[in-house]
Image: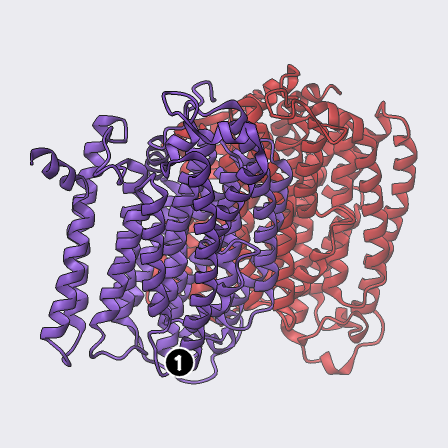
Chain colours: A red, B purple
């Protein structure tokens, strides 16, 4: 059991999906029950792994399973986790578990909804545990289909547009990624990520075995691979200028799907860059680190400014994600241990804080059926609990000291400031603008929704119910707890981050 | 006498199939005017026997490195390559026969000749895929074409069907003439109709070959080869010989369209693979000819890029599902051509694998079309509104086929595309791979318009008829599409076995 624990975690949701397919359509209680079990068990297993089974002092892959899958192309079923992926696996299982009660408001075609939700979980977990690039890619693509339908069927008025836009953008990125993966396989003879990383570290992954022998149209093989992979992952993060699918997808998606999208799907991009892009082409990464830093800072500032201009609550939160994920890119590009740890921590913390923000939007949308920031006012008088939780969520998101977001943003910026790469100090200074603007749009939004004169239309609104509080509670807890004890996460990640930075030559 | 019988044994599958066709024809006369379902069952039974004979032949051929040393009557080459495509044909014909039986819009009486024509087309394919002799190849191709013309126009009263048949005849006749001219040029220059002799000419005891002619003057050789390739390009609907495809696919009865899109197209590719392989790549081919083969490869690569792009872009605008699938089949011809353009044995394997993958997903997509023609009586994508909620099994199966046609994992279509990309890059055709990859993004848009209409819109009317047998079949096909996407080593080995018997020297040092 312990040896195959990752396989169980990944495929229990799939068993749940099959069970739901066979379940009668009208028995929604049974369907929800199955979904609870199928998301709950992976969460319990992941928690068990996190606190007890996992050796956090080691930077090596643990719980490894490596079985030959397709012999002719040397693709393997190779799974394993290190500290970095384990943290994200745990976050995924938590988010998906919370997404189940958060979905109780959905009444349309519940059977399909929960089946697709579980399929989505299989895809996400699969990406985090895969150590074989072929397997990684398969899981990466499996996610797209359920996401398309979840946005497209249960989304808002412009859901068809948002769903296909999401699908097309992500697929455009991933076909480029596929070409790079195939090229790497042809050069090295393996899909194994640790093996590819090793070869790259030794300088043996330069495309010498390809027909064009390393150079193509005046660009080095590694440069090509780097940009193909980078674009594939950057679309997912999303980094400016690849972010335009995100506001549409977020705004149209139903609340629990927005939560998953912001909480975990965006992290796949950052994780992919760390695990399956930079390490495979370290020289190209070093060469373009400054470009990535600039893109990160543009995302931070641009995302914050655009969020400031929104009147749609959800759209504002969506753009805040662009801004927050900019820190991840900036931290990674700095190529220092602090920067990289900060980026990893920021991914986790954005996972929890953005989940809270989207749940907050969901609460008010369920009652008012609109999200116009200017249409509310004075809600603190009728919904005190909601106001209180929103305050915590907003403060976590804007990086108030003592909250999780502060630690990770501070680490990222410090790490970037320490960077040896010329010009990063300027980038750090510039990104401070983003912090100020983030505080501005969040506080301004709070003012417009909760303070001021009570809008009479909403005077009879009930406060948050127990289900809604329960959905937000774990994330708010994490936002506060990791602000005070960030080492509960950092200690797990540290060895693998150290190794990663060393591999990259930082 | 003994030798004669042995040689007859080599063409046992063809003989069995011919026998079945004759039985069908006679029984149709005997049972005239009555329910033709029984004829359909006879066809299915006959196909099962043929498949069994072919399977035995496939296994026996394993003992002789995939190909028999002797040909049957100096004409029919018995090798695994041919047998692979014959099995493919039998498999698709069985499904097509099932489709005819399940077709709601088809009349049920006096359609025995429908089955006879289908079987006749299959006999044509059988001969054309298993010969190195250009004459027999031409005869097989013409038999297939003649049967297809009549099948396309089978709905005599239907204007579109008649139009389709006429267009098909005109285009087909023209391209057959062009191809025949190319073949006669080749014959005139080399004095042989045997592809192997042409390719190896000048070496291994063949007196005159392509090489000798080529060294004298490359222009007529190039002309002849381009003319022959044009004939094949027409058969597999490669741009610029694709104009007939959308009209014929749309006008022909849906089972016939299925046959044209799957079996006929695969047969076209089979002869194309054999032609290119035997002339330019086989063991012992003259250097000059091999070098010329690289130019042909480049030509094919350009054709592949143009074909897939044009096919996909045209498909974007279609409102009829049938017409959309026609353009999609043009685009897929472009993908298959990638493997050929690589001009390597592994590239050929990838092409064959992709055709096998295409079998699952395209039969599925056409089965879906047939199902909904029975429900709504329309081929328009818009008529599928909300069908996902009314017919979940069929609709979700269709989603699998669409995913596979787009080339997303974990389906067989993805693995096929991966192999093609792989061989493309390995052959130095990186640009073509990028074009193909971007093309699959474009194709996502129109494929998923079907999914969108089915699931993202509300049903309009209360049509509730179902065809459980067809729905079950589509579900099985959908499951197979996923299963072969995950467990595909066997299918790849078969494709490779088929390719290996073409006699192309294999690259042993491959990793």
In which quadrant is the N terminus of chain B drawn? Answer: top left
Give the x, y percent position of residue B509: 46, 18
Chain letter of the residue carrying label 1: B
**B270 left or right, relative to A184:** left
Q: In percent of the image, x 27 and y 37: which residue is there?
A: B77
Looking at the image, is A52 positioned above or below residue A452? above
Q: Residue furthest left?
A: B1
Sort mark 1 into few (<14), some (14-19) or many (20+) by Cα contacts within 10 Å: few
Please indicate, yes or no, whether residue B345 appears anywhere in the rendered image.
yes
Q: Which residue is mark 1?
A: B377
> In the figure, A430 relative to A499: above or below?
below
The image shows a total of numbered marks equal to 1
Q: Nearest the camera: B446 or A329?
A: B446
Outermost residue on the top side: it is: A202
Residue shown at the point (59%, 18%) measured from the top left: A198
- The residue positioned 49% from the left and 39% from the top of the image is B340
> SS of the residue at dot 1?
loop
Residue B212 coordinates in the image, percent (x, y): 49, 27
Comparing B187 with B114, the one in front is B187
Left-right relation of A40 to A140: left
Residue situated in front as seen by the camera: B330 or A430: B330
A465 or B400, nearer to the observer: B400
| Residue A79 appears anywhere in the view | no
Rendering coords of residue A411 (x, y %): 78, 33
Image x and y of residue B69, in percent = 24, 28
Above/below status of A395 relative to A31: above
């Amino acid at each position: 059991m312990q040896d195959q624990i990752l396989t169980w975690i990944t495929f229990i949701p799939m068993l749940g999906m099959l069970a739901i397919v066979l379940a009668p359509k009208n028995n929604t209680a049974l369907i929800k029950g199955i979904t609870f079990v199928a998301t709950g068990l992976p969460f319990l297993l992941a928690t068990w792994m996190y606190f007890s089974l996992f050796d956090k002092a080691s930077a090596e892959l643990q719980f490894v399973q490596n079985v030959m899958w397709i012999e002719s192309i040397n693709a393997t079923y190779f799974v394993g986790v290190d500290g970095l992926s384990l943290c994200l696996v745990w976050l995924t299982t938590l988010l998906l578990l919370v997404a189940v009660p958060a979905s109780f408001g959905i009444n349309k075609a519940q059977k399909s909804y929960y089946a697709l939700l579980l399929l989505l979980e299989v895809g996400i977990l699969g990406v985090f545990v895969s150590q074989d690039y072929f397997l990684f890619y398969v899981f990466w693509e499996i996610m797209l289909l359920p996401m398309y339908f979840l946005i497209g069927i249960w989304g808002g008025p412009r859901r068809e547009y948002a769903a296909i836009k999401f699908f097309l953008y992500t697929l455009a990125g991933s076909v480029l990624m596929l070409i790079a993966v195939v090229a790497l396989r042809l050069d090295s003879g393996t899909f194994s990520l640790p093996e590819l990383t090793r070869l790259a570290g030794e300088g043996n992954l330069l495309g010498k075995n390809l027909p064009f022998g390393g150079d193509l149209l005046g660009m080095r093989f590694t440069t090509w691979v780097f940009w193909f992979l980078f674009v594939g992952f950057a679309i997912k993060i999303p980094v400016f200028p690849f972010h335009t699918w995100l506001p549409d997808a977020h705004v149209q998606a139903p609340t629990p799907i927005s939560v998953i999208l912001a909480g975990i799907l965006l992290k796949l991009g950052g994780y992919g860059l760390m695990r399956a892009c930079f390490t495979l082409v370290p020289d190209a990464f070093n060469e373009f680190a400054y470009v990535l830093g600039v893109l990160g800072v543009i995302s931070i500032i641009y995302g914050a400014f655009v969020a400031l201009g929104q009147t749609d609550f959800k759209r504002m939160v969506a753009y805040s994600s662009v801004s927050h994920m900019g820190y991840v890119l900036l931290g990674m590009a700095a190529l220092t241990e602090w920067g990289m740890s900060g980026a990893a921590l920021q991914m986790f913390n954005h996972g929890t804080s953005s989940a809270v923000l989207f749940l907050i939007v969901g609460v008010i949308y369920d009652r008012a059926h609109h999200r116009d920031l200017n249409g509310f006012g004075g809600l603190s008088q009728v919904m005190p609990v909601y106001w209180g939780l929103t305050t915590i969520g907003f403060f976590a998101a804007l990086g108030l000291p003592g909250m999780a977001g502060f630690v990770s943003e501070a680490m990222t910026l410090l790490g970037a400031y320490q960077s040896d790469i010329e010009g990063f100090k300027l980038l750090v200074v510039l990104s401070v603008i983003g912090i100020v603007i983030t505080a501005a749009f969040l506080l301004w939004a709070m003012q417009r929704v909760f303070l001021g004169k009570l809008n009479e239309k909403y005077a009879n609104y009930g406060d948050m119910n127990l289900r809604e509080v329960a959905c937000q509670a774990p994330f708010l807890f994490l936002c506060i707890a990791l602000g005070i004890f960030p080492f509960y996460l950092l200690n797990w990640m540290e060895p693998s981050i150290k190794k990663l930075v060393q591999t990259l030559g930082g | 006498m003994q030798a004669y019988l042995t040689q007859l044994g080599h063409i046992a599958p063809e003989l069995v199939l011919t026998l079945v066709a004759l039985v069908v024809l006679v029984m149709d006369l005997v049972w005239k005017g009555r329910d033709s379902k029984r004829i359909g069952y006879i066809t299915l039974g006959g196909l099962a026997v043929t498949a069994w004979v072919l399977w035995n032949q496939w296994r026996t051929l394993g003992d002789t490195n995939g190909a028999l040393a002797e040909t049957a009557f100096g004409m029919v080459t018995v090798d695994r390559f041919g047998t692979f495509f014959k099995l493919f044909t039998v498999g698709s014909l069985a499904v097509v026969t099932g489709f005819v039986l399940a077709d709601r819009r088809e009349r049920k009486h006096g359609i025995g000749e429908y089955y006879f024509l289908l079987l006749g087309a299959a006999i044509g394919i059988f001969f054309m895929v298993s010969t190195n002799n250009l004459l027999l190849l031409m005869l097989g191709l013409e038999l297939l074409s003649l049967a297809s013309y009549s099948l396309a126009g089978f709905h005599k009263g239907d204007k579109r069907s008649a139009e389709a048949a006429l267009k098909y005849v005109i285009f087909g006749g023209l391209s057959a003439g062009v191809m025949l001219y190319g073949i006669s040029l080749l014959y005139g220059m080399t004095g042989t109709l045997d592809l192997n002799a042409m390719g190896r000419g000048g070496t291994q005891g063949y007196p005159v070959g392509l090489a000798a002619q080529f060294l004298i003057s490359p222009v007529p050789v190039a002309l002849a080869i381009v003319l022959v390739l044009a004939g094949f390009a027409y058969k597999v609907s490669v741009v610029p010989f694709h104009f007939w495809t959308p009209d014929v696919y749309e006008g022909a009865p849906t089972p016939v369209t299925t046959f044209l899109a799957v079996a006929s197209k695969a047969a076209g590719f089979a002869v194309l693979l054999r032609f290119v392989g035997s002339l330019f790549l086989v063991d012992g081919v003259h250097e000059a000819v091999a070098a010329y083969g690289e130019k042909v490869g480049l030509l094919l690569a350009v054709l592949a890029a143009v074909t897939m792009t044009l096919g996909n872009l045209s498909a974007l605008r279609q409102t009829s599902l049938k017409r959309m699938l026609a353009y999609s089949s043009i685009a897929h011809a472009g993908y298959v051509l990638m493997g050929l353009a690589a001009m390597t044995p592994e590239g050929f394997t990838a092409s064959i694998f992709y055709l096998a993958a295409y079998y699952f997903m395209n039969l599925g997509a056409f089965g879906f079309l047939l199902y909904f023609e029975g429900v709504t009586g329309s081929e328009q994508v818009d008529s599928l509104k909300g069908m996902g909620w009314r017919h979940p099994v069929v609709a979700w199966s269709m989603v699998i086929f669409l995913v596979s046609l787009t080339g997303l994992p974990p389906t067989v279509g993805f693995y096929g595309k991966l192999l093609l990309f792989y061989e493309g890059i390995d052959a130095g055709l990186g640009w073509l791979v990028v074009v193909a990859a971007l093309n699959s993004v474009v194709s996502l848009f129109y494929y998923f318009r079907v999914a969108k209409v089915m699931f993202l819109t509300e049903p309009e009317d209360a049509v509730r008829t179902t065809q459980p047998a067809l729905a079950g079949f589509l579900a099985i096909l959908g499951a197979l599409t996923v299963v072969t996407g995950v467990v595909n080593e066997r299918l790849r080995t078969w494709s490779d076995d088929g390719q290996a018997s073409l006699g192309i020297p294999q690259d042993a040092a491959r990793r």
